[in-house]
Each structure stands twice: as structure tokens, then as C-alpha cells.
Amino acid sequence: MPPLTSSTSFSSVGGSNSDSGANAIDHLEPEPTKFFFKEKYAKLGVRGNFMPLAAQPKYVDLGEWLAHQTVEQYRLVEALLQCIQEVDTNTGLPVCNPKGCPVMSAGRGHIYTWLNNDRVPIRVPACQYISLVQRWILGKIHDNRAFPTDSTTGSVASTYASGSLNTPGANTPIAMGPTTSTAPLSTLSGHDWVGKKGGFPETFFNDVKTAFRQIFRLYAHLYHSHWVDPFWHMSTGSNSSGWTDLNSCFVHYISVAKLFGLLAEKDMEPMQPLIDIWVANGSIPADAVNGACTIVPPQ
């Protein structure tokens, strides 16, 4: 895998464009219906309304809530990714490896490419693409300029709730407000943006949307390439953990993404049949389906 310093970041190549750092390409002939697109396998591992987990609390700043959701959704998908990154003792390779997954895809119809340093889209093995996405998201979470936090140690890990960051006692992210000595002039002027009140930079909302877009692609690959192995094999029966836990995490993520309008409809195409099932049976709350809290950035 290329070192982080030589891999092009999403922000440096994408800016505010609709796609940053990776593009969905190669729409080929439709595939046969997958098992996970059948209502029988749309069951969840947990029951309840996901709206309380998605909705912004009354006294929490929008920037803080989006930061919390970004970290939380990454934490959930990271735990699932570990299932395909563990080495199989029989083969000596991870479940997701360059031979089995030579490209980052969500079925034959969607292949995701990475922009290299020359801004040329290239195909890389799924395991490499996933590692690059993980580095980028963790890099943002750990960057006080991108996700500023009020921490005595100056570390995001001491403030954000993420099991991957070894923070067992962490709570909802607490953003550090700007001061006249530390804030850029744009922050102190009349220009406004999502997260400004919480001390987040002007690029914050684009970073959040990019992270959510890439997290979706991670889920899409897990379903299309690894639903049977390992998630079905992890189950001892049709109602056991494994694929139902995958469903629970994904429906939670989709509820947040749709509620705040963090994903374009086109982005969701690889998983739309499953999303439609959850919309119809109410697993995705109505307010989320309707994008009740869709964020429109200030002009």
C-alpha cells in the first residue's frame, strides 16, 4: 500500500466537487439478484427506532453532532471491516485480498477508482482502497484543524467516541470555539458555513460528506463481495448474528445519511433494493426517508 504522504487526499483533488478522490465507474450489465436484496435477509440484529440515534439533540451544535456521527459511523463500519481483514489460517491471506478482490467494487456494475498523484483514476485492490479510506478518515478525525476539539492533551482520541481510538470513556465530541487569537479572519467575519458556531473550519461539511460517501462504499463492498463470506458463515442460523448485525449497522448509517442529506441518490444505487425494503417496512424512520433535516449550506 502506498504511504499516506504519496497518496492523494480527497480534499486536495476534490474540493467541493460532487466526488472527491474516487469515482464510481464502469456500469456493466445487471447482476442476478443478491441474497441480501431479498426481504427474508433484510432482518436486523436489533429492534427499535433508529431516529433517536440519528436526530440532533436539542442543545447540541450541528457541527458537533455531525462530527460525532462521522466518528460513530466510522467506528461501526471499522468493526465490520475487521471481519474481512483478519488473516484466514487456511490460506494465510485476509478474506479480502488482492486475488479475490482485485478492484474496489460493489458488484459488476460499480467499480470505484482512486485518483493518484497525477489526478488519474486508477484501479487498486479493494483491500488497498479500504486502507486508504481508513487512513483518510482517521487522519481527519485526528486533525485538530479539521475536527477541532477542546482537549487538554490536544488529541481527538481523548474527546471522540471511537473504539478504534482506544477511548473507552469518551463521550460526544466537544468542539472548541474560535477565539480572536486563534481563529482565521474568515471565521470572525460575517461569512457563514456549517459548523462555524462550533469552531469547525469552512471545509468541515465537505469533509463530512466525503467521509459518509466513502463509508457507503465500504458497506457496498462488504455486501456485494463478502455477504456470504464471512457474514453468512458467521451465522449459525437465519436469525443469528453476522449478516443481521451488518444490516443493523448499515440501516443506522443510512438513517443518519438520509436524515441530513449527506448522500446523493446516485451514490446509493448499489444498495438501493435493500434500502427500498427498509423504507417500505419502516426500519428507516420516515423523517430520515424524507430528509427532514437535510443541510443546505449557507451561500
Image (cartoon, rainbow, N blue to C red):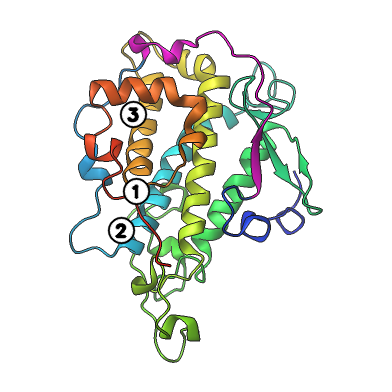
Q: Position of residue 205 (x, y in %)?
A: 45, 60
Q: Farthest residue toward the right?
A: 118
Quick one: which residue is furthest to the front in this view? Answer: 299
Residue 12 is inside the magenta segment: no
**Residues shaded magenta:** 21-41
For the question of whether residue 215 can be seen, the reply is yes
Which image quadrant is residue 13 in? bottom right
x and y, in percent, of residue 73 in the image: 41, 44
Q: Secondary structure at mark 1?
A: loop
Secondary structure of the residue carrying numbered label 3: helix
Q: Which residue is mark 2?
A: 172
The image position of residue 68, as x and y in percent, is 36, 55
The quadrant holding residue 27 is top right
- Of badges 1 and 2, nearer the viewer stands 1
Residue that appears at 50% across and 28% down: 269
As shown in the figure, which amino acid type bears the numbered disc 2? Answer: Thr
Quarter of the picture holding the C terminus: bottom left
